[in-house]
C-alpha cells in the first residue's frame, strides 16, 4: 500500500510540474509577443507596417478563397475566352 501512495504522489507531482511548466511557457511567450507588438506600435513607420500587414492578409485571404471557395474554371474555357478576346481585338 505504501508503494501505491508513493506512485500516486509522484504522478500528482509530475502533473503539477507539467502544468506549471506549461503556464510559465505560455506567460513568457505571451510576454514576448506583447513586447514585439509594443515595439512595433512605437516604430516611426508603424502606418506603413500596418498597411503592409493589411495587404498581406488580403492576399492570404484571396489565396484561401481561391483555393477552397470555388472550383477553378475549365482550362479549355479559359483558352476559348482568350481566343475570342484576341479576335475581338483584331477586328477593331
Image: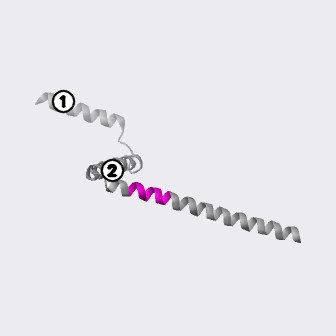
Residue shown at the point (62%, 61%) measured from the top left: 21
Which residue carries the number 1 mark? 87
Please tell me how crowded label 2 is: few (under 14), some (14-19), or many (20+) other residues with Cα within 10 Å.
Answer: few
Is 91 positioned to the left or the right of 75 in the image?
A: left
Magenta-drawn stretch contains 50: no
Q: Which residues are magenta?
A: 29-37
The number of discs equals 2
Q: Is residue 44 above or below residue 86?
A: below
Q: Position of residue 18 (x, y in %)?
A: 66, 62
Q: Farthest residue in the left direction?
A: 92
Label located before the other in sequence (2 or 1) = 2
Q: Could you say where residue 31 lies in the image, as x and y percent from the top left?
A: 47, 60
Chief secondary structure of the magenta portion: helix
Q: Residue at x 52, y 59 (%)?
A: 28
Residue position for label 2:
53
Residue ranking furthest to the right: 1
Q: What residue is shown at x 26% (from left), y 36% (from top)? A: 81
Amino acid at each position: 500500500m505504501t508503494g501505491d501512495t508513493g506512485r500516486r504522489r509522484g504522478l500528482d507531482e509530475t502533473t503539477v510540474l507539467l502544468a506549471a511548466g506549461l503556464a510559465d511557457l505560455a506567460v513568457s511567450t505571451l510576454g514576448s509577443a506583447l513586447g514585439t507588438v509594443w515595439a512595433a506600435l512605437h516604430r516611426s513607420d508603424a502606418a506603413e507596417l500596418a498597411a503592409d500587414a493589411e495587404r498581406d492578409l488580403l492576399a492570404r485571404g484571396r489565396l484561401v478563397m481561391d483555393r477552397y471557395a470555388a472550383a477553378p474554371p475549365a482550362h479549355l474555357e479559359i483558352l476559348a475566352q482568350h481566343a475570342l478576346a484576341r479576335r475581338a481585338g483584331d477586328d477593331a
